[in-house]
């Protein structure tokens, strides 16, 4: 998260947002660029965006650049320098970082553009104009991400960075991106929904109740004896909603119905319906909805319409109140049951002292007996599996947690055409679970939950 800090050139920046953000930019990078511009009229015309890329690349690469940092160091690079601009900035960067600099800048005064590298914030900011500057932010992870942004700006300027987004219009958007990125590495995000369901079924029985199925939706849930709960609604089509309630959390707002309801913003309508106007249970508490009816009380809201994600309203609330993912209660209430590699009665009894070991053991035994009564999964059609694997080998990969097969990343539907249609037919034939692609994904991108039967075949194609 971004907190109050002293920004470059002595400007105090509060969350890199609002008036403070503009003051930082105006007094720092843009302010200095504007002053230089007044002293030195811009004779070199800015190549129009529609110009031939090679011409624009040549002109952009050959313009003077100024490097600076938050320690007061400054260096100018000119086109006749025997070193390339990238090499010169690389040396400047290494020297400044060794001296403790956390913010560095590359300025192009001729075109009124700048790139700000915020190493302590894990981000970059691109700037265009001096009078009413356009400022946009992007999350960066790792040294390679910074190198890409630097090289792209040096070679092509502000516009060339369009393809290296997403870019956020303000620091609030950047902070929300930080939260989403943090959650992307969380225990819940990297747990396969299949394993999540298996463990929640056991924990529901340990807590003294049976999973409840109404229509095609199964409700699972447990509490910790202090009024804190975890609930999950899992649909037959693979979509799901997980809700945590931590009564000690700063997100707990039972007396502010509007603020509570806003945390559910962004949850798909079919999943939101699972927690609207439903009877209270031993693990659910209802809160009035501002438009009438009720909502299940929550401090954490996570949906599985695509890759597991926090509700957009929850992200906004965390960003606004400067809270972290731990404030949702997910870590304290659920992570301990998901991180343990061997999910055994002994492990659960150790993680949850409020349950009696004999109840834990009995629930594991009951779940195992029911698992043994379920029909075995039918083998897949080998021809369909082979063709799926062939498409995966040509156009796909597994996400970093091996929860999804990702196919046709970055492609539009027009790019992939009939091959995409064939893949979707194969997915249905094989009974695999296709989920929504993440927001911002290309129109042709397809995400499918991994399946151990397919994984075994894919080992031959990797």
Image (cartoon, rainbow, N blue to C red):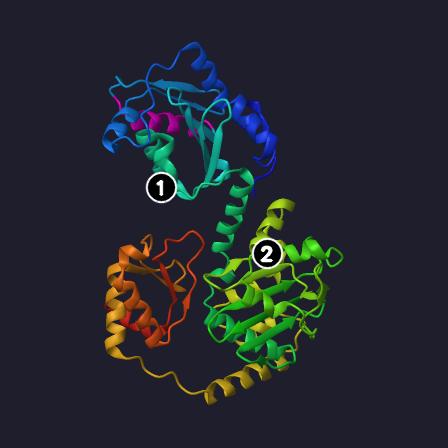
Relative height, residue 234 to residue 259 (above, below):
below
The percent position of residue 314, horizontal first and vertical second, equals 60, 54
- Quarter of the image where the N terminus is located: top right
Residue at point 28%, 80% (across, down): 381
The percent position of residue 385, horizontal first and vertical second, equals 27, 74
- Quarter of the image where the C terminus is located: bottom left
Q: Which residues are magenta?
A: 83-100
> Circle 2 sits on which residue?
265
The residue lying toward the viewer, choosing from 109 and 209, is: 109
In three-dimensional space, the C-alpha distance between marks 1 and 2, rounded to whole angstroms, equals 29 Å
The residue lying toward the viewer, choosing from 122 and 426, is: 426
Q: Are marks 1 and 2 in contact (CB under 8 Å)?
A: no
Q: Earlier in the sequence, mark 1 or mark 2?
A: 1
In the figure, is residue 372 to the left or right of 22?
left
Residue at point 24%, 20% (across, down): 82
Q: Which quarter of the figure has residue 20?
A: top right
Q: Give the class, few, some or many, for how many residues have Cα within 10 Å of label 1's Cα (few <14, many ≥20).
A: few
> Circle 1 sits on which residue?
163
């Amino acid at each position: 998260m971004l907190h109050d800090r002293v920004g470059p050139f002595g400007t105090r920046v509060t969350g890199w947002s609002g008036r403070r953000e503009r003051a930082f930019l105006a007094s720092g990078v843009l302010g200095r660029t504007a002053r230089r511009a007044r002293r030195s009229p811009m004779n070199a015309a800015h190549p129009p965006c529609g110009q031939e890329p090679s011409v624009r690349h040549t002109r952009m690469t050959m313009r003077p650049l100024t490097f600076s940092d938050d320690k007061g160091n400054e260096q100018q690079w000119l086109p006749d320098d025997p070193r390339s601009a990238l090499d010169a900035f690389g040396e400047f960067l290494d020297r400044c970082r060794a001296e403790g600099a956390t913010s560095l800048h590359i300025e192009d005064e001729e075109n009124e553009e700048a790139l700000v590298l915020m190493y302590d914030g894990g981000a970059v900011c691109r700037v265009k104009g001096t009078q009413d500057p356009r400022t946009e932010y992007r999350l960066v992870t790792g040294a390679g991400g910074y190198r890409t942004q630097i090289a792209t700006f040096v070679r092509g300027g502000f516009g060339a960075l369009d393809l290296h987004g997403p870019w956020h219009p303000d620091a609030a958007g950047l902070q929300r991106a930080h939260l989403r990125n943090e959650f992307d590495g969380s225990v819940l995000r990297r747990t396969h929904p299949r394993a999540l369901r298996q463990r929640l079924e056991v924990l529901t029985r340990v807590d003294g109740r049976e999973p409840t199925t109404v229509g095609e939706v199964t409700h699972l849930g447990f509490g910790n004896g202090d009024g804190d709960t975890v609930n999950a609604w899992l649909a037959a089509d693979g979509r799901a909603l997980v809700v945590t309630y931590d009564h000690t959390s700063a997100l707990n707002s039972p007396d502010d119905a509007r603020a509570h309801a806003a945390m559910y913003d962004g949850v798909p309508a079919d999943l939101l319906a699972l927690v609207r106007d439903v009877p209270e249970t031993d693990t659910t508490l209802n809160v009035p909805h501002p438009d009438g009816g009720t909502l299940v009380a929550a401090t954490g809201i996570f949906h599985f319409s695509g890759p597991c994600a926090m509700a957009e309203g929850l992200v906004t609330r965390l960003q606004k109140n400067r809270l972290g993912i731990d404030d949702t209660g997910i870590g304290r209430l659920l992570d301990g049951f998901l991180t343990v590699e061997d999910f055994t009665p002994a492990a659960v009894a150790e993680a949850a002292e409020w349950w009696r070991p004999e109840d834990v053991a009995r629930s594991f035994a009951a779940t195992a007996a029911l698992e043994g009564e379920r029909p075995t999964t039918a083998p897949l059609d080998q021809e369909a599996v082979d063709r799926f694997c062939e498409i995966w080998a040509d156009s796909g990969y597994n996400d970093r947690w091996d929860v999804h097969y990702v196919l046709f990343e970055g492609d539009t539907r027009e790019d992939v055409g009939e091959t995409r249609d064939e893949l979707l037919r194969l997915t249905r034939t094989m009974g695999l679970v296709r989920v929504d692609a993440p927001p911002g994904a290309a129109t042709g991108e397809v995400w499918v939950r991994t399946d151990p039967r397919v994984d075994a075949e894919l080992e031959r194609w990797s």
